[in-house]
Structures are given as structure tokens and as C-alpha cells.
């Protein structure tokens, strides 16, 4: 039974299927929820790894160009960004393992 039929039946006060209980059409199956949760964790991990590392590297390139210190600030900030990414992923793993 589709959602619009359930809404119409609820509005009219009519029980579909001769009064037999029906399942909630808006509730997702357990397996589908698990897949969405896993995909969400993967996306969360991806930004935690790439944003600090790439952002720090690009910032290092920009500051190196301004100050003429190529490649030292880029390398330093890339290492710091990688360390920050590792820390963020570690926090996420701790949070996920608690759940």
C-alpha cells in the first residue's frame, strides 16, 4: 500500500484491508538503515581525512609563494594536516565503537 492511500484512509477514518493492521509504509527496513549508516560513516571519514590534509597543503603553498620559503611551509603544514586528520579519524572511530 502506498503512502497516499494510507493518508487518505487515515483522514477518512477508514481501516484499510478490512481493519487488519498494516505496516508503516514510511519506516525503512533495518538493512536499509544500516547501509545508510555505513555510507554516512564513510563520508564522514573521507572529509576528516582529506579536508585537513589538502587544506593545510594548499595553505602552505600559498604562504610559501607569499614569503618565498618554498617548500618548507607547505611540507610543515602538510605534516600537521595529516596529523590532524589522524586525530579526527581516531575520534570518529572511538565514537563509532561506543555505539
Image (spheres, helix red, strand yellow):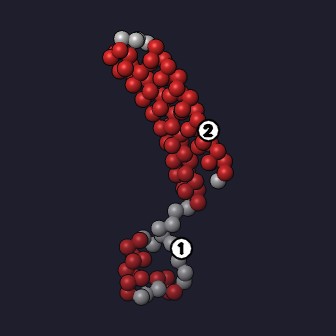
Q: Callout 1 environment at 10 Å: few (<14), some (14 to 19), or many (20+)?
A: few
Q: Position of residue 12 (x, y in %)?
A: 38, 87
Identify which residue is drawn at 32% across, 17% down: 66
Local SS, label 2: helix
* Mark count: 2
Local SS, label 1: loop
Drawn side of residue 42 relative to residue 58, left or right? right
Q: Quadrant of the N terminus?
A: bottom left
Q: Which mark is residue 90?
A: 2
N-terminal of the two: label 2 or label 1?
1
Identify which residue is drawn at 64% across, 53% down: 99
Identify which residue is drawn at 50% across, 19% down: 76
Give the answer, above or below, for where 26 lies relative to 85: below
Q: Which mark is residue 23?
A: 1
As measured in the structure, the alpha-carbon distance from the residue carrying label 2 to the one carrying label 1 is 40 Å
Taking the view exactly as shown, the residue that stands out farthest to the left is: 66
Give the answer, above or below, for where 91 lies relative to 68: below
Q: Position of residue 70 (x, y in %)?
A: 40, 11
Amino acid at each position: 500500500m502506498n503512502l497516499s492511500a494510507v493518508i487518505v484512509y487515515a483522514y477518512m477514518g477508514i481501516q484499510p484491508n478490512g481493519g487488519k493492521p498494516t505496516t508503516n509504509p514510511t519506516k525503512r527496513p533495518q538493512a536499509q538503515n544500516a547501509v545508510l549508516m555505513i555510507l554516512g560513516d564513510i563520508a564522514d571519514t573521507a572529509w576528516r581525512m582529506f579536508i585537513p590534509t589538502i587544506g593545510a597543503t594548499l595553505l602552505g603553498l600559498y604562504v610559501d609563494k607569499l614569503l618565498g620559503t618554498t617548500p618548507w611551509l607547505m611540507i610543515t603544514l602538510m605534516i600537521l594536516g595529516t596529523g590532524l586528520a589522524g586525530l579526527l579519524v581516531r575520534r570518529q572511530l572511538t565514537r563509532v565503537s561506543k555505539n
